[in-house]
Amino acid sequence: MDERIKGKGEQIVGKAKEEIGRATGDRRTEWAGKVEQAKGKVHEVIGEAKADQERAERELTRKK
């Protein structure tokens, strides 16, 4: 699975956990959601970097 898609999914799930935690007053769930969102953002950035690298490699091989 593409890292970007995985990251977006984690961010969505994390936001839901954060909101549920906030609505119920459960700080642990709220913070778990924030952590999951951060992990998702990291995966998204890694996926973008990989995609950029692949594009650059294709450009280099095309120019030869």
Image: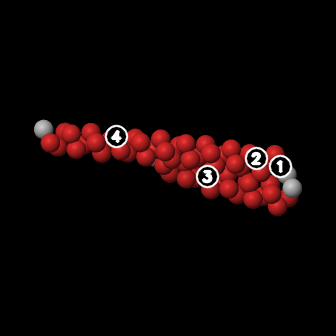
Whether 60 is drawn above or below 34: the answer is above
Disc 2 target residue:
31
Residue of label 3: 11
Q: Which mark is residue 27?
A: 1
Looking at the image, residue 3 sits to the left or right of residue 35; the answer is left
Q: Position of residue 33 (x, y in %)?
A: 71, 49
Question: Amino acid under label 1?
Answer: Arg
The residue at 49%/45% (across/down) is: 45
Give the residue at mark 4. Answer: 53
Precedes in sequence: disc 4 or disc 2: 2
Amino acid type, mark 4? Gln
Q: Could you tell me how far apart the alpha carbons at marks 4 and 2 are, in whole angstroms?
A: 33 Å
Crowding around mark 1 (Cα neighbors within 10 Å: few <14, some 14 to 19, many 20+) is some
Q: Which residue is depicted at the point 64% across and 49% down?
A: 37
| Secondary structure of residue under mark 2 | helix
Q: Amino acid at mark 3?
A: Gln
Relative to 28, is 36 on the left or the right? Answer: left
Report the Cα–Cα distance between label 3 and label 2.
Answer: 13 Å
Quadrant location, the C terminus? top left
